[in-house]
Image (cartoon, grey):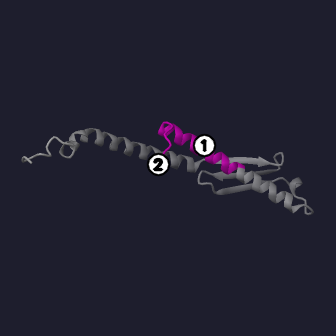
Amino acid sequence: MAKGAFRGGGYGGGFGGGGMNMNMIKQAQKMQQEMLKMQEELELKEYSATSGGGVVTATVNGKKELISVKIEPDAVDPEDVEMLQDLIVAAVNEAVRKADEESAKNMSKLTGGMNLPF
């Protein structure tokens, strides 16, 4: 083989797209910063849901932490505690679903619909 046989081949010429790679890295860093900002904003939001026709209201934050539960007095029946428990679970689950839905919607806007594993 002649000296320098690898020049111009696939091996040595792979650095020609360096500018494009740097641009992609910058775009990825920008997207990451935007995602962090969006995540911080979402964590500050509150999501409420009701069950039982509004007798139980649960509120979660963007971290999906339960921050409050409101129960109307007429929802409290000492003879049917299980019903109250079910209403609380339903309200909490719906509030968490709302938080998930908004998070996914905002993530989709940011990533342009790309299905990224974040």
Residues 62 and 100: in front is 100
Dot 2, how many residues are within 10 Å of its Cα: few (below 14), some (14-19), or many (20+)? few
Judged from this view, the residue extending furthest toward the right is 79
Q: Amino acid at mark 2?
A: Leu
Q: Is residue 113 magenta?
A: yes
Q: Is residue 30 left or right of residue 110?
A: left
Instruction: Point out residue 117 in the picture as x, y percentages from the top left corner.
Output: 49, 49
* Disc 1 secondary structure class: helix
Q: How many marks?
A: 2
Q: Which residues are magenta?
A: 94-118
Instruction: Point out residue 77 in the picture as x, y percentages from the top left corner.
Output: 90, 59
Judged from this view, the residue extending furthest toward the front is 1
- Residue pictured at 86% horizontal, 62% vertical: 81
Residues 48 and 115: in front is 115
Marks 2 and 1, how far apart at CA:
15 Å
Q: Amino acid at mark 1?
A: Glu
Instruction: Point out residue 96 in the picture as x, y percentages from the top left corner.
Output: 66, 51
Residue at label 2? 36
Residue 67, which numbered label? none
Q: Is residue 82 left or right of residue 89?
A: right
CB atoms of marks 2 and 1 within 8 Å: no
Instruction: Point out residue 25 in the picture as x, y percentages from the top left corner.
Output: 33, 44
* Disc 2 secondary structure class: helix
- Residue pictured at 75% horizontal, 51% vertical: 91
Judged from this view, the residue extending furthest toward the left is 3
Q: Is residue 24 magenta?
A: no
Q: Secondary structure of the magenta portion, mostly? A: helix
Residues 1 and 85: in front is 1
Dot 1, how many residues are within 10 Å of its Cα: few (below 14), some (14-19), or many (20+)? some
Residue 102, which numbered label? 1
